[in-house]
Structure formats: C-alpha cells, structure tokens
Amino acid sequence: MPTPTASRIAIIGAGSVGSTIAYTLLTNPIASEILLVDPKEEIRDAQVQDLSDATYHGNTSTQVRAGTHAEAGQCDVIVVTAGAKQKKGESRTDLIGRNQSILRSVITDMQPFKPEAILLLVANPVDVLAYFALQYSGLPANQVIGSGTFLDSARLRGALATKAGVAASSIDAFVLGEHGESQIVAWSSACIAGIPLHVFPATRSLDREAMATETKQKASALIESKGSTEFGIGSVTASICRSILFDQKVVRPVSIYVDELKVCLSKTVVLGRKGVEEIVELPLSDEESGALESSAKQLREVIEEAEKQSS
Ligand SMILES: NC(=O)C1=CN([C@@H]2O[C@H](COP(=O)(O)OP(=O)(O)OC[C@H]3O[C@@H](n4cnc5c(N)ncnc54)[C@H](O)[C@@H]3O)[C@@H](O)[C@H]2O)C=CC1
Ligand SMILES: CC(=O)C(=O)O
C-alpha cells in the first residue's frame, strides 16, 4: 500500500513506549515523517539518532526528527505516551494525579490543533486520560481515541489461539470497558472462524474466568518481571495509526467517549481517516452489559476523584 503523502505522526514522550511506537512505524512505514517530542532533550535526541540509524539501510520512506509540542499539534495523528509508568505493585489508576497534569500541559503546549488531527492516547490510565484529553483539546469526540482494550484483546486472542491450535488472526474475541481492573470479555460474541467458542471442539470446556483473569493481569505480570511493557502497545498503536491514515474502516476495540455512560471506555468501532467513524455495538449478554455499566461507573468515580483533586 502506498504511504499517504506528507502524513505526519507526532509522538509525545520519547521513553520506552514512545520510541517503540516510533520504531514500529519506521519498520512498517505509513507516514512521511515522525516527530518525537520530549522535554528531556538529551534522551529525545539520542532516541532520534538511534531510530535514524534504523533507516539508513534504505528500506523505509519515513524520516524521524525531534519536534516541539506546537509542531506536534499540526500533525495528522498525535500519539500521547507522555507520563509516568506503573512501578511494581501500582495500578494504572494510581498514575492519574501525575499524568493528568502532564496531559494538561502537553495539550496546552500543542494548541491550536490541526482541525482534522486525531489525538491518540496511550499513557495510563488511558480511558481517564482520553476523557480529559477530549475536554482539554476541544477536538470533536470522534478525533480523540485511547488505545484502550485493543492490547488486552490481542492478549486474549493470543491465549485463545494457543488453546485452540489456530492462528490468532482466525479468532474474533474482544475485551471491552476499562483498560484495567474492571475490563470485561465479550464471551457471548467470541468465535473462531464464525464458530462460537462453546461449539468449537478445542474451546468447548474453556475456563473462561481463568483466561479473563490472565488477560487482565498480564501487564502486571510483565511489569513484575521486566519493569515495563512496550512491544505489544508499540504494535497495537502503529496498527491504529495505519487504520486511520489509510482510512481502512477496520473494526477495533478502542477507548472512545460514550455519551450515555459519560466516560471514555472501549467499545468496538470502525476506524478510518476521521478517527471513530461509527460505534459497532456487539450483542452482549445481560451479564456482560451489566459488567460494562459497572466498568463505566468505576471509571466515572476515578474521573470525579481526579476532578476533585485538581480543582
Ligand atoms: N495503554 C497501554 O496499553 C500502555 C500504556 N503505557 C503507558 O505509557 C506511558 C509511558 O510509558 P513509558 O514510555 O514506559 O514511560 P517512560 O518513563 O519510559 O517515558 C515517558 C516519557 O514521557 C516524557 N514526558 C514527560 N512529560 C512530558 C511532556 N510534557 N511532553 C512530552 N514528553 C513528556 C518523559 O520525559 C519520558 O521520556 C505510561 O503512562 C505507561 O503506563 C505503557 C504500556 C502500555
Ligand atoms: C502497561 C499497560 O497498560 C499494559 O501493558 O497493558
């Protein structure tokens, strides 16, 4: 597929997640330029040089350079990874105090935005930050997206693929709600090649609860062992950027503002050049619908507490 001419992606935060996203976008080129933005200039510039070294053997059409927040505001897709990461034993919501104020300053520094820019939140707690990004940026709701449970859904598909002995790409299974503790698996619509999991021979007697828990706890397990996660989110974020810039209209679980629930959380949506082109409502069981509402309630509580703390 051709690279959309002159598309530019800004990555705010040149730490391990930001640089991994940049590397993924260099090795699978979809834009003409990537801007890395970080107040730690020494780290930012070293990341730019190291990433540039990956481009000199001639198989990428993408350039990478250091940029300012103001330049980032004029890019087509702006990926926000700026912020603290969880330490061992911390939850994503423990980061809200630090990361909400970083987000506020990042958005102030980027304004005014290119009118059709897509703001893609990755920093945690991603659903709560997506909610505040929508408020602070003034961009339309379809242009503010969080990576949400796309990564959890990939993790679930990986575990199901191993269990079923089929490729992960043959599995349709979505994690919805919060990218965090209150996430839910939409088991009632999960299938392999169109065959429901309770009918597919290898998944008939699946321990769903154990698999959902393993999916939910995967990030903490990785952080416990290696201190961070970056490759999964790097791949997922690059995939979202591709879906947007190539106007792919693929259905993905990402975090978006849901008016009835008054929060951002993950639902399946059609992703294209306008960002969220449509919400695709999965048919959920009563239990799953209730769990999704409860996930929204928990996110609402985190938002209200953060608003109280910052007022
Ligand atoms: N949504 C997801 O699935 C995932 C989210 N994350 C989150 O991504 C975030 C970043 O993680 P890492 O890259 O590992 O952390 P890191 O500490 O390696 O990098 C964060 C970078 O943000 C920069 N930064 C701080 N303030 C800034 C500002 N005003 N403008 C630009 N840059 C600024 C810092 O200087 C630092 O270089 C964390 O909140 C982490 O929890 C990480 C993995 C997966
Ligand atoms: C850190 C994080 O949010 C993840 O790996 O899922």
Image: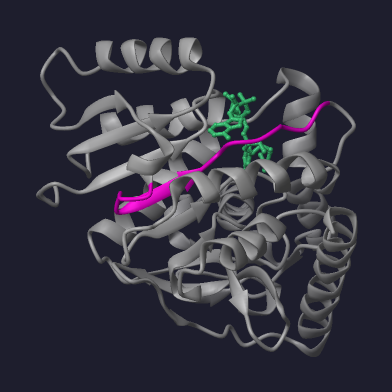
Residue in front for this viewpoint, 189 or 72: 72
Q: Residue 28, percent across and down?
A: 26, 36
Q: Quadrant of the C terminus?
A: bottom right
Q: Residue 195, percent across and down?
A: 53, 75
Q: Residue 279, percent across and down?
A: 50, 82
Q: Give left or right: position of 107 versus 276.
A: right
Q: Is residue 104 above or below residue 257?
A: above
Say if residue 92 shows up in the picture.
no
**Residue at image point 75% right, 60% down:** 206
Q: Is residue 277 above or below residue 83?
A: below
Q: Give left or right: position of 258 versus 166.
A: right
Tell which quarter ligand 1 is in.
top right
Q: Is residue 138 above or below residue 245?
A: below
Residue 2 lies within the magenta run: no
Q: To which quarter of the image does residue 209 belong?
A: bottom right
Residue 79 lies within the magenta run: yes
Q: Give left or right: position of 297 versus 200.
A: right
**Residue at image point 52% right, 24% down:** 39
Q: Residue 26, percent across and down?
A: 27, 30
Q: Give left or right: position of 25 versus 94.
A: left
Secondary structure of the magenta portion, mostly?
loop
Q: How is the image coloured?
A: one colour
Residue in front for this viewpoint, 31 or 98: 98
Write the start and end of the magenta stretch as one range.
73-87
**Residue at image point 74% right, 87% down:** 285
Say if residue 147 shows up in the picture.
yes
Please state the total of marks drawn on the protein image.
0
